[in-house]
Amino acid sequence: MIDKLKTQGGCEFVTQMARVFPSIVFLNIMGMPLDHLGEFLEWEDMILHQEGIGEEVNARRLEGMAQVMGFFSGLIEQRRAEGNADAEDVVSAAINWKIDGEPVNDMEVLNCLLLLFMAGLDTVASQSSYAMLHLATHSADRERIATDPDVIPRAVEELLRAYPIVQTARKATQDMDFHGCPVKAGDMAAFALALANRDDEMFPDAHRVDLDRGVTRHIAFGAGPHRCLGSHLARQEMAILLEEWHKRIPDYELAAEPIEHGGQVFGLNSLELRWDA
């Protein structure tokens, strides 16, 4: 993917790289051929990247969800019919799972696959886009990664700490007063993980990205029973992307101001980069 982009002298990183790479990984994990990539990117866009609110936007999202559910339902049926005991893909493993000693049914497998689809694609795309935005605007960090690839695992942790994308929320179970703020049972409270990860009491000079910090005790992946199930895969994807990109394109810069979006998952709508082809 990077070799194809290198000769162009620039790219729109979000749509040409960040969203495509984790989708390819997802297809491989599912044991599906890459010729489904175009469909997956289209469905992902329909579900996760619709702007605005209203009936038309919701209908578009529901249409994408229906397409994904229909595809996965057919995939589950196909894997059950094949019954390949040597298959190593997630779907083949999932149809043989047991919960409390009982075999899983198709709906339980379908719910699992939908969760992997929703949680494993857009998050990695957003996180890697913010990493590249930082490196495009901080030349010393970019040069360090390009010339010293051994620092990349630490760099991934530090970029996760400094740019956490998922913002969690919890529902209050009872009325209470929290430091003068009245909270009613049923109220939702949103927690900005970015503020916690940039807390100077926890991380000295927390607003500065330090590739030698060596800290993994951040909460970019959440904590406790709600910790991200895919954190190890996400780390691998980011590390591989940064290593392979900087082998081929070590020097690049912003070609235009990036466009961001907020919400429960922060992300970039566009990240225009340029380099000497």
Image (tube, rainbow, N blue to C red):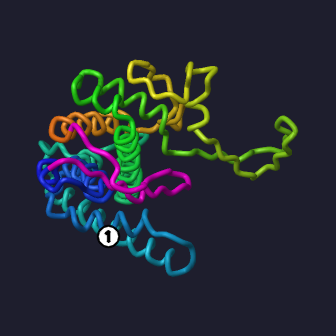
Answer with the quarter of the image where residue 176 lies. top right
In front here: 40 or 81? 40
From the image, tell me which residue sits under label 1: 70
Placement of 40 over or under 162, stated as above or below: below
Q: Nearer the viewer, residue 226 or 218?
A: 218
From the top left corner, tell me how far across and down residue 7 is, in percent. 12, 53
Give the camera-side residue of 259 and 159: 259
The single residue placed furthest to the front in the displayed view is 276
- Residue 195 makes an appearance in the image: yes
Q: What is the crowding at mark 1: few (fewer than 14 residues within 10 Å), some, or many (at least 20)?
A: few
Residue drawn 31% across and 46% down?
Answer: 253
Quadrant of residue 256 within the rendered picture:
bottom left
Image x and y of residue 274, in percent: 26, 51
The answer to whether residue 147 is left or right of residue 135 is left
Q: Position of residue 130 (x, y in %)?
A: 41, 44
Q: Is residue 216 left or right of residue 77?
A: right
Q: Residue at x 38, y 40 (%)?
A: 131
Q: Position of residue 87 (x, y in %)?
A: 14, 45
Tell whether 39 sits left or right of 82: right
Q: Is residue 269 magenta?
A: yes
User: Above or below — where is 257 with respect to 58?
Assistant: above
The question of residue 231 being in magenta is answered with no
Q: What span is colored magenta in the figure?
A: 250-277
Residue 58, placed above or below residue 122? below
Please, what is the three-letter code of the amino acid marked with disc 1?
A: Gly
Q: Secondary structure at mark 1?
A: helix
In the rendered view, tell whether residue 99 sits above or below residue 271. above
Name the residue at the bottom extreme: 56
Q: Residue at x 49, y 23 (%)?
A: 217
Q: Residue placed at 34% from the left, 59% from the top?
A: 106
